[in-house]
Image (cartoon, rainbow, N blue to C red):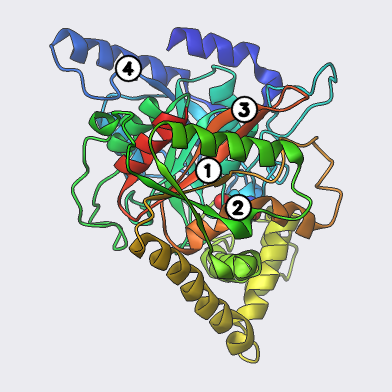
Amino acid sequence: TEACLSAIEEAGALNAFVHHTPEIALEQAKAADARIKAGEAPSMCGIPLGIKDLFCTKGVPSQAASAILGGFKPEYESTVTSQLFDAGAVMLGKLNMDEFAMGSSNETSTYGNAVNPWRRGNDDAALTPGGSSGGSASAVAADLCLAATGTDTGGSIRQPAAFVGITGLKPTYGRVSRWGIIAFASSLDQAGPMTKDVRDCAIMLGAMAGHDPKDSTSAELAVPDFEAMLTGDIRGKVIGIPCEYRMAGMPEEIEALWAEGTEMLKSAGAEIRDISLPHTKYALPTYYVIAPAEASSNLARYDGVRFGHRAKLAQGDGIVEMYEKTRAEGFGDEVKRRIMVGTYVLSAGYYDAYYNRARKVRALIKRDFEEVFAAGVDAILTPATPSAAFGLGEMAEADPVQMYLNDVFTVTVNLAGLPGIAVPTGIDKQGLPLGLQLIGRPWEEGDLLNTAYALE
Ligand code: GLN
């Protein structure tokens, strides 16, 4: 814990940690020492973690990297963090992210972006650690913590993990409680571990997962011993390669990485099968209707009364002016864009044309996966991202839709509620990490982790 705390001090330029909690960390570390001395060593005992700013942590600023939550210190602890602490984990501080988890580069954060510890060849230009869990990715990759929590609504664990060369898992929707995690799009959001390797991922998922009566969408299923399932034996498993993920204009290196990963699984004894997920092309537009719709509803609670920031009011201002001024000051541009798109697609005249249609297409996307799994496929292998980490400023200045294209391989998994994992599998010509994604059957994270283990 002490080594991590000093590494964090030295790595200020990465802007990964946005709130530091050294007192809490040292106290938790002492308690962990005492538990070990007492012969009790739960799975995360003494493991120093970074916590994404989207998790409510009792008495510690929890702002979702938004100005509108300025000064907000929750009175309660999220289920995930409280389970991690019960398992002996240590919190070093809160990690940077895109505002309300909306973004793919960490550039929508009110704290300014976190930075990727990797560089392109000899080029000094700073690169994005990805988003929205960019601070988590940067901190784990730079050894500022042993692992971090992330959340994934459309790829926010897997894309940043791939951009910094670490492992990140989005569990099946309902595997991990969402209680106490600041909501973005409730039917898509899921928290998961971001770790150095698959084994750490299995151990940490075990501590995060489980039924929670405070989240009605959390599943009443036992949590298996994921670590014990890592045998590396994948003989006879069927791995699907979906033709729709072979996109025009995909960099050759990604194509080559995908072929290499396929070969690796094949030589480990898996059967490789070409498959089709025909509704994949509708996934991005579907996601960018549903996610903003849910966000616009979830973010209505930030009104200047209940949480965080309230704008200074002028003489004669009423409640409407208070809402308007607070939201104008408190929300960033991308969040405002999502709220406007979301309220539009939910409005009386457009609800059927956009929101309802998107829900129907979502069902078709889910059915594509169900059919493939019913035909005997155990896991699906795809690239995690369409490129390696890009330069800061490169995409943000382009059209926002350009940024949304980053999620092309990951959003289907959230729309279908499936588990997905990004595994670092290669280095590109410029020396940047690249990752592959494995998508598994619902609730079979253990199997998925084991296949990822064979790929690592
Ligand atoms: N990049 C996607 C978005 O901006 C996904 C974000 C996420 O998974 N939280 O919505």
Residue occupied by mark 3: 426
Residue occupied by mark 1: 437
At label 3, counting other C-alpha atoms closer than 10 Å, the crowd grade (few under 14, some 14-19, many 20 or more) is many
Q: Mark 3 and mark 1 in contact (Cβ < 8 Å)? A: no
Query: Which numbered disc flags the more N-terminal residue, 1 or 4?
Result: 4
At label 1, counting other C-alpha atoms closer than 10 Å, the crowd grade (few under 14, some 14-19, many 20 or more) is many
Horizontally, residue 174 falls left or right of residue 300, namely: left
User: Is any part of residue 16 visible from this angle?
Assistant: no
Q: Nearer the viewer, residue 126 or 264?
A: 264
Residue occupied by mark 2: 409
For the point 56% across and 63% down, which residue is it? Answer: 299
Q: Nearer the viewer, mark 2 or mark 4?
A: 2
Does label 2 point to a residue whose CB lies under 8 Å from ligand 1? no
Q: CA distance from mark 2 to mark 4?
A: 35 Å
Name the kind of residue labelled 1 in the image.
Gln
Label placed on residue 46:
4
Question: Residue lying furthest left in this view?
Answer: 39
Which SS class for mark 1? Answer: strand
Q: Nearer the viewer, mark 2 or mark 3?
A: 3
Query: Which numbered disc flags the more N-terminal residue, 2 or 4?
Result: 4
Q: Nearer the viewer, mark 1 or mark 4?
A: 1
Q: Mark 2 and mark 1 in contact (Cβ < 8 Å)? A: yes
Q: Residue 442 location, x and y as percent?
A: 34, 56
Which SS class for mark 3? Answer: strand
